Amino acid sequence: MSLLAIETTGPVCSAVLRLEDGRLFRRKGTEGLRHLTSLIPMVEGVLAEAGLPARDLECIAVSAGPGSFTGIRIGVATARALAQTLGIPVIKVPTLEAFVYLREREEGQPPDIVCPVFDARRGQMYAGAYALEENGRIMTLVPGAAWDPVDFLASLEASMAAYARYRRHRARGEDAPPAPGICFMGDGVPVFKDALGIPGAQFFPEAVQDAEAVLSWALDFGRPERYDALLPIYMRKAEAQRKLDEKSSQGAASAPNLPLREAGEEDVLGISVVEQLSFGEPWLEKSIRDDLELDYSDYVVCERDGVVLGYAGLHRIGEEGDITNIAVHPAVRRKGIGTAVLAELIRRAEAAGVKDFSLEVRVSDKGAAAMYEKAGFLGEGHRKSYYPTDDGAREDALIMWRRGSGKKAEYIIV
Amino acid sequence: MNDGILVLGIETSCDETAAAVTVDGRTALSNVIASQIDVHKVFGGVVPEIASRHHLEAVCGIVEAALEDAGVRRDELDAIAVTKGPGLVGAVLIGLATAKAMAFALGKPLVGVHHIRGHIFAAFLENPKLEPPFLALVASGGHTSLIDVRGYDELAVLGGTRDDAAGEAFDKVARVLGLGYPGGPMIDLAAGEGDPDAARFKRTMLEPGSLDFSFSGIKTGVLNHVNTQRQAGGPVDTADIAASFQQAVVDVLVEKTRLALEQTGRSALVLCGGVAANTALRERMEGACAQAGVRLFMPSPVYCTDNAAMIACAGYYDFKAGRRDGYDLDAYAELDL
């Protein structure tokens, strides 16, 4: 497949064309915001050099943000119009995640956790944290967003601890794998360096958005879609909109506006990442996929910009719903996401006729139990030695029910 | 199917996303406009960043609709015309990036069009007999200019505004009177109920013989008048003020136009731009032209507001004159005609 990748979200505009046989043709501008005037000439240049007529181009990948709003729009508008005119699909590439490909790796070295950090002004940074796994998969440790540096660091630390635990579990008693390194890359590094106090971290402030990284991401993870499905990843509202929203929500504690929806096949990877960062014995990707496909299972995800932040699933058995799993990404806990996905899961199941809901929770997990109580669940029993613990022992599960049917239950111990 | 020259026009310079197809620059086969008025209403005016976001999401669909309405396939187009400025630069560049990508992908000529030239050329769409030379008064939210159209390729600016554009004054006064956004139509509506002689606002004519405009004095006069009424605790007679303000602006526009006609000796006038949709201005200009024996051409309201048929039309004449733009065409906030 011939694939054109364009990058206009950062200080340098670039384009790269990859032909079916793997040959690459590149154009890269110099620093300076001349993206609107240089982009199509660059596209023209790579196609001409490759001897590929525009009509033979098969797909376009575009860096969709975050970054300069205007820069994002130049790339996205161009990609949309090219794809629409040529009748070909587009691939939307998350700019932060593509930065993983800018980190050069040495053979045999453990993968780094790559943290792209862009200066978003007003004391914030567009940032995320990504681990490139040995199997080539990118695990999102901190979802990309416009972060306050302090919150970002707290989320990063929580996620790094979860990630280290996951790697230990995965090694299963064999020699623990070497701890991954961490690096911060991008124009936000000099601005926020003081706030990025992770011991042993490396800094690459000169790293710049590049179409080749966009191309690599697209080749590994791209999902071709129609031009009109391609929307920018701004990660921030227009300033006037933000002020208006602030004004209209003054006084009232507004509920966080979380993007909740039914889970689909495209969420399996994201769900699996949250599983791995949350549980000692995470469900395998295949189990999640199989479970999603059952006609008596319901799954709800909270997903933003392609990253699963939390999810919950249940099995329907007549008027009873057994909540099989619920988890929130460690980088975004205590923000109401768990409560929201649970409420949405229950709302959907009730609409399908489910009245009584049950779930199990570790007896030591008082925080989770409190959240379930708030959602209307009551302890109705125990399962002995149900969960394994980190130190190799076992732990009881508390069984909780939320009864909509009025059914009375006795406390049971199994 | 179509033997004539087919031009696709794209316009995104302010808060309308528009695309149109014209044949031979004189007939609009389609004219699709998606207005963002409802989006910007809550802000009391156009917010550039929000306008740009909406243009980006809308423009491909609008282009598709314009081609479909016209019954024209992309490969039948002879050229793609697009507004290059003046306007909100972040908004202009959405149309420009789209047009460039289309032109490149299709291998069709690209023609960048001056927005004001587009407003003037809108008059050709419904008047097959209209030919230069003629005088044009362009009055819109961003511009108030008197232009001597000596030929399709020879436009001379005789005068422009030194401060606010006429439409800008309408917007600001409408805001003060609490009439909302957009100001032009709101004032027009309110003025219909009011007495245009209720208040007297100064008509700024500048030095004798000048064809320039200044509307900030009229605007300030209205603001002071409203403040005085409010401070006196009395009711603010919105309709009367709107009518009086509108009359003052119209007086200036008509008088300056009369002067320009006199200076140039032109026997035809084109009244265009968003403010040309104003009822009072249309009526008064008709009267003045009848008296002076000047033929008056006013595009229908749909061609007065920002639209892409006018861009396709102006682009057609640029194309015919052999003008082509490269893919390095830039977007401009300010741009000489």
Image (cartoon, coloured by chain):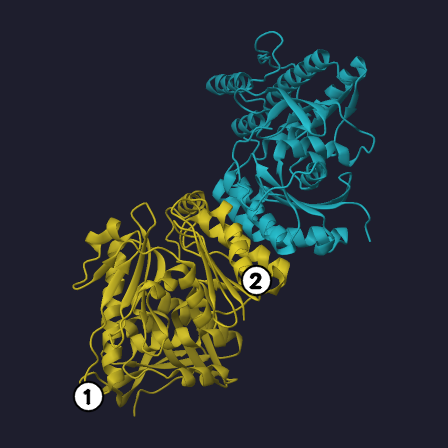
Chain colours: A yellow, B cyan
Which quadrant is the C terminus of chain B positioned in? Answer: top right
Hey, which quadrant is residue A413 in on the image?
bottom left
**Residue located 44% across and 44% down the image:** A244
Residue lying farthest to the top in this orientation: B208
Q: Mark 1 and 2 residues: CB-CB less than 8 Å, in contact?
A: no
**Residue located 59% across and 35% down the image:** B182
Residue lying farthest to the bottom in this orientation: A414
Q: Nearer the viewer, mark 1 or mark 2?
A: 2
**Residue A242 pos. (x, y %):** 41, 46
Q: State the residue in front, B92 or B231.
A: B92
User: Where B77 sits versus A325, above or below?
Assistant: above
Circle 1 packing at 10 Å, graded few (<14), some (14-19), many (20+), is: few
**Residue A233 pos. (x, y %):** 45, 57
Is residue B247 visible in the rendered structure shown here?
yes
Q: State the residue in front, B301 or B294.
A: B294
Tell which subunit mark 2 falls on. Answer: A
Same chain for the residues under marks 1 and 2 in the image: yes
Q: Secondary structure at mark 2?
A: loop
**Residue located 69% across and 46% down the image:** B79
Q: Is residue B314 rendered to the left or right of residue A108?
A: right
Q: Secondary structure at mark 1?
A: loop
Q: Is residue B124 rendered to the left or right of residue A354?
A: right
Q: State the residue in front, B31 or A380.
A: B31
Is residue B31 visible in the rendered structure shown here?
no
Q: Which residue is mark 1?
A: A392
Disc nearer the start of the sequence (1/2)? 2
Tell which subunit mark 1 falls on. Answer: A
Hey, which quadrant is residue B329 in on the image?
top right
Circle 2 packing at 10 Å, graded few (<14), some (14-19), many (20+), is: few
Q: Which residue is mark 2?
A: A51
Spatial CA span between label 1 and label 2? 62 Å
Type of amino acid under label 1:
Gly
